[in-house]
Amino acid sequence: MPRIALASRDKVPANQHEAFDRFVKERGDIPYTGPLAVMLNAPEMLARGEHMRAYLRGEECCLSDRIRELAMLITARENDCQFIWFAHAAAGRRSGLADTLVDNLRDKKPLTGLDPEQTAVVEYGREYFGTRRVGQPTFDRALAQFGVRGLAELTTLMGYYAMLAFNINAFEMLPDAGAEAMLPV
């Protein structure tokens, strides 16, 4: 059960009403769960975050959909974030990630048969989230796969989704029931 009530226009500062109204008009409603439901309580912050999300999820980002989805799933798994996992497991499968990869990642089983890009993402994310650092060998392998720009985008994508996971987990936002299995936590 979420720890807060739905955001509403009358609960945000008057100087953020315009940002609130713009978001609700563009979206069509007020989100009742997930990171946007939390962040809408600070509509200007949400608007700025949406610009980052649009870049990282859009065509300007040099990472493939498959790699972006894997990065989001690694971030969800390493942060035990049900909402992000649920939102991206099926999308990861549609982007070309093997069912066994998604299932084994969810269940914390060994990951086998990964290509070099996938291996770089998994090692990079797990090492960072596990130690709050990335050692030189892991960094070098990721850099060799994605180049400086790609690695900067990968790092920022994982950081952005970690920020979303922090909001989701702290405010106890859970996904609606659906086809994907929940994370065992």
Image (spheres, grey):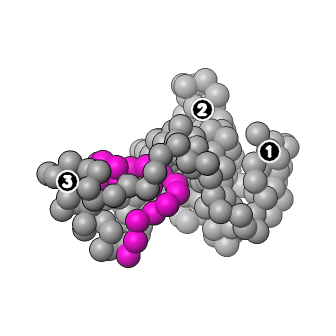
Question: Which residue is disc 3 drawn over?
Answer: 16
Q: Please tell me whether residue 35 belongs to the stretch shown in magenta.
A: yes
Give, as a three-letter code, the residue at label 2: Phe
**Is 148 situated above or below 25?**
above
Query: Does the magenta segment cover residue 133?
Result: no
Q: Is residue 165 visible?
A: no
Q: Using the numbered discs, state the Cα–Cα distance from disc 3 to disc 2 in whole angstroms.
A: 34 Å
Residue at mark 2: 129
Highlighted range, magenta: 28-49
Outermost left residue: 15
Q: Image height check: is 147 above or below 130?
A: below
First in sequence: mark 3 vs mark 2 = 3
Residue 94 place in picture, x, y as percent: 67, 72
Q: Which SS class for mark 2?
A: helix
Q: Residues within 10 Å of mark 3 (few under 14, many from 20)?
A: some
Q: Mark 2 and mark 3 in contact (Cβ < 8 Å)?
A: no
Q: At x 18% / y 62%, what residue is drawn?
A: 18
The tag earlier along the polypeptide, 1 or 2, is: 2
Tell me residue 12's x, y (percent). 26, 50
Residue in view at x 43 percent, y 56 percent: 6
Kindly indicate whether the residue at mark 2 contacts the one at mark 1 (C-beta within 8 angstroms): no
Camera-nearest label, 1 or 2? 1
Dot 1: element: loop
Q: Earlier in the sequence, mark 3 or mark 1?
A: 3
At label 3, the amino acid type is Gln
Measure the alpha-carbon separation of dots 3 and 1.
38 Å
Residue identified by numbered label 1:
184
Which of the two marks, 3 or 2, is nearer to us in this view?
3
